[in-house]
Image: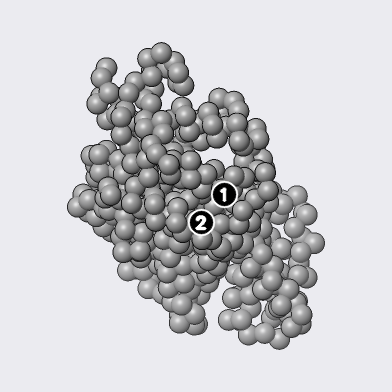
Amino acid sequence: MDVKEIRAMDHEKKKRIGLLMGILCALYWGVWYAPGYAIYVTPLIADVYDNMIIAGYSQDVAGVLQAVFLTAINAIACAVLLFVWNGGLGKMGELKRTIVQVKSVTKYYILAGICGACAVSGTYIAALFLSPGFAAIAGLLYPIIGTIMSVLYLKQKVSKRGYLAIIVLLAGGITLYSGSLVTGGVDSANPLIGCIGGVMAAVGWGFEGAVAGKALDLTEPDIGLHLRFIFEALFWIIVLIVLLICGVPIFDTIGGLFEPTTFLLVLLIGLSFAWCYVTWYKSFPMIGVARGQAIASLYAACGVIFLCIFLGPAEALQYNDDSMWTIVGFTIAGLIICLIGSFLLVTEDAENTATLREGS
Amino acid sequence: MMEGCPIKFRILEFVEDGPKRTDEICNALAKEYPGHDNDYGKAKIKYDCIELASAGILNESDIVVDEEGIFQQGKLLITYSLSGLGQDYLEYLKKTVKPQKV
């Protein structure tokens, strides 16, 4: 085998690793929905809302504070579990070496953590005030912002086929969740807060990818995402402490964390979300931010599949006898479109991803 | 200047004075960073080089197959040099890096 053939194989392998990471990200993100929904019925989260109502806050404020508390728990769980991950990989030294470089790279991860905080809390708010379907669709718009930012800000190149695959994947994801919106519309007392949450999700994740992509040029992905979670966790801890000082009973349910079922759910949320981010960040240096985000948007399909497995199709897709065929039809159509988009991306020429920027 | 800094920073500085091959970079840096002077540590440094090249920060040239087992038998030995973007990044790092005691 000559050098040219081995080189072509290397490029193909690099592309496959990038795509595999994106697909694993979608799987972990999808499976995260199962404990993510289940945790809402635990006293740790459910009682936050009740406590706020008892304390005299409106339903809207109570809902937002509940989302903030859950996002904080999620971020802290991820940050803690990633110490185990990076410790196992022997990367604690690199974490120490990187965290002190605030001026050169760490500032980008502080920004990525804040963008991520905005996105995750936004998706919870959108799900709570509108519907989980709307939240998923709003979240799915993030690769559009991510692609624009990666081309304009990071100067990464995307082929025509890459663009086409991104558009098809997004169309598939949106179709997946459109059934519930077409049949039921949106029933909400305050849809504006839900819409703001949706915008926060799309803009937050889009900008996070671009900002993290910049820092990932100079740091290891495992370290980068850990820093991002450490800063997101710190951000939420500060927010929660400020709320506590202002007299909001935000920590009243924290004792419930150590109840075995709740603790297991927090552990599952942390593991699935942390690994989702591990694979998300690892895909960026291999196939670029735009493709990485697009293939990860398969989380919409994975989320539907895992929710159907764990909750049953009727509960997962939220249909009744009248709306069943419409919702199931949209879901199947969305899954097929997602498969076509993935096929377009997977069969893209590996030379397009050999280097993510034009040579200089 | 970049000793004791994140490995990717050090790789950029290491290839500043001229192109270097995979084995030269990995062997030299593995000795500098504690816990890296083994196959796993060297593989991590090699992966960093691949990511830097993928990002367009390093240019690749003089690619040969490692038939003698100098580094990893049957795998490619690639000579890396700084690209224009890599030089910009290195200048940026020199202005912003916090030097470490080694």
On screen, residue A144 above or below B68:
below
Residue at left offset 76%, top offset 80%: A245
Can you give x and y, in whole percent of width and height, for residue A199 in the image?
43, 73
Q: A338 or A320: which is nearer to us?
A: A338
Q: Residue furthest right?
A: A255
Q: Which residue is mark 1?
A: B1
Q: Quick one: label 2, few (<14), some, or many (20+) residues within 10 Å?
A: some
Can you give x and y, in whole percent of width and height, for residue A143 in the image?
36, 60
Image side of residue A297 versus residue A127, left or right:
left
Gap in angstroms between the C-alphas marked 1 and 2: 8 Å
Amino acid at dot 1: Met
Q: Earlier in the sequence, mark 1 or mark 2?
A: 1
Q: Secondary structure at mark 2?
A: helix
- Same chain check for tags 1 and 2: yes
Can you give x and y, in whole percent of width and height, for residue B99 in the image?
61, 53
Q: Which residue is mark 2?
A: B94
